[in-house]
Image (tube, rainbow, N blue to C red):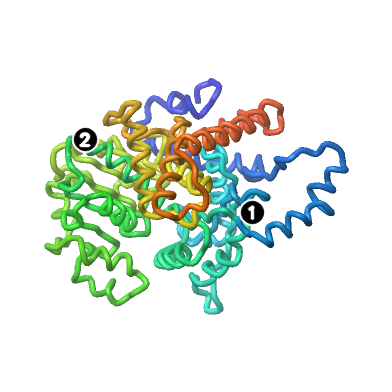
Amino acid sequence: MKDLTLSLDNLEALLPESFSQAQKARAKTLFYKELALRAHRFYNGKMQTLPKAPVIGFNWFNVWYTPGVSNISTTIREDNDTSYELSNRGNLVAVVSDSTRVLGDGDCTPPGGMGVMEGKAFLMKYLGGVDGIAICVDSKGPDGRNDPEKIIDFVKMSQYSFGAINLEDIAQPNCYRVLDVLREECDIPVWHDDAQGTACVTLAGLINALKLVDKKMEEVKIVYFGAGASNATIARIVNTAGADPAKSIMFDSKGALHKGRTDIEEDRRFYRKWELCQITNPDKVETMEEAMKGADVLIALSRPGPDVVKKEWIEAMGEKSIVFVCANPVPEIYPYAAKEAGAHIVATGRGDFPNQVNNSIGFPGILKGALMVRARKITDNMAIAAAEAIAKFSEKRGIHIEDIIAKMSESDVFPYEAADVAMQAIKDGVARKEMTWQEAYDLAKTDIEHARATTKSLIDNGFIAQPPQELLHESLKAAIEAVK
């Protein structure tokens, strides 16, 4: 390995020159996984709890705790909505999961999801100025099967401690019922980021990709590869935003969805998939080979690749084709291979490839927008407003085929998005509090800047240690050896 200071920004330069593109892509994936294990062990996770009120002598504990705090309890008792201003509830999100479908790794047991849930909380704070707490629950019933009612009951009982709930990594079909019941029966927003979040950001990327190829949403032929919670919700949101469902075809592990899929019709737990069977693929196309002929867009969220999506499928697509391959941690086909097959625009869920279409650009701003106006729910209109805000913000600063939407590093996208979401919540009648767009933007921007400045201060003053170089070097060495 070359003797250079290693950072995540110069990783590509430190890989062997003899490596092919496929080997480099695999080495980077293995490096991030290896470094994640070493870094999480070094830091013992990545989140902590800190006070935001001062301690100016120990007599202040009489204010922050007893006897003074009893006045807070009785005030909230008389008007529960005052909990949003007298506690941190108004800026606090619970990231709730039963860890039954963690990324591409399947059921990881309840504590196995903690790394991802802490990661969500990490991004919420740094990108959106929102406090988050990871909660992984055991949803198994007496028969050993995962019971959605247990998650529903847990969230309903604990909702009064939070301003919103972010559901994560709950396997289908349970995820459908959990979200749909909680959205209606809770008095705070319940958001399923794997489904709604992925749909929001995918729609944002699709809006701008279609602008670049000069095609209209209502006219394009879309093929969806994978029919899990993410893609099923993407299809629903994209259709709501103007796509023609009759021009789309979706595939699950057993084949194409259409009205003849009695296996889906009979299992009512998959009611969201059956809804799509009713409105898509009217010609009952059965194979990917046939579906991809002349297709304008491929949206794949299936299983980690590479080579899950075949080059010959992409070769069969129409002119200036758009390919979203967003399986994690490895896309269904590497971007270079999709480009070789003729794709005009390629997006993945990863930040080390062009065109990252990832929830991280969506949920921090969406949740911040909902929290600022104390929304009772996040409507589909709010999700679409967020997508349009991301697309509009990105277009204003300039887009091209290798850069269709804003990146996480573009911090101003989040308050812009949050303000649009807040305005849509007010318009939809689900907000407890009203404010102007500028007030929402300014508040979100202030909170985000505060979160980033706090983190920087902790690093600068040594309360958060820099990762030792040996962590990075040993991780890279292991990844290179595994690929050779």
260 lies above or below 470: below
State the image quarter where residue 335 is shown. Answer: top left
Residue 445: image x %, image y %? 52, 33
Residue drawn at x 43%, y 50% is: 425
The mark total stands at 2
Q: Nearer the viewer, residue 99 or 371?
A: 371
Amino acid at the residue labelled 1: Thr
Q: Check whether the beta carbons of the residues at disc 2 and disc 1 lie within 8 A of each other.
A: no
Q: Is residue 252 left or right of residue 330?
A: left
Residue at (68, 33) in percent of width and height: 464
Rendered view: 350 above or below 402: below
Residue at 64% over, 59% down: 79
Above or below for 355 versus 301: above
Along the horizontal axis of the image, is 243 left or right of 5? left
Residue 31 visible, this orientation: yes
Tell me where residue 330 appears, x and y as whole percent: 39, 45
Question: Secondary structure beneath disc 1?
Answer: helix
Q: Amino acid at mark 2?
A: His
- Residue 314 drawn at (x, y percent): 20, 44
Which residue in the protein does label 1 denote? 82
Image quarter of residue 287: bottom left
Q: Please tell me how crowded label 2 is: few (under 14), some (14-19), or many (20+) other residues with Cα within 10 Å.
A: some
Callout in the foreground (2, 1): 1
**Label 1 crowd (10 A; few <14 / some 14-19 / many >=20):** some
Q: Which numbered circle lies on residue 110? A: none
Looking at marks 2 and 1 on the same chain, the residue that comes earlier in the sequence is marked by 1
Measuring from the top left, give residue 442's x and y in whole percent.
51, 33
Q: What residue appears at the point 30 percent right and 30 percent down from the top-left corner?
A: 402
Q: Which residue is mark 2?
A: 344
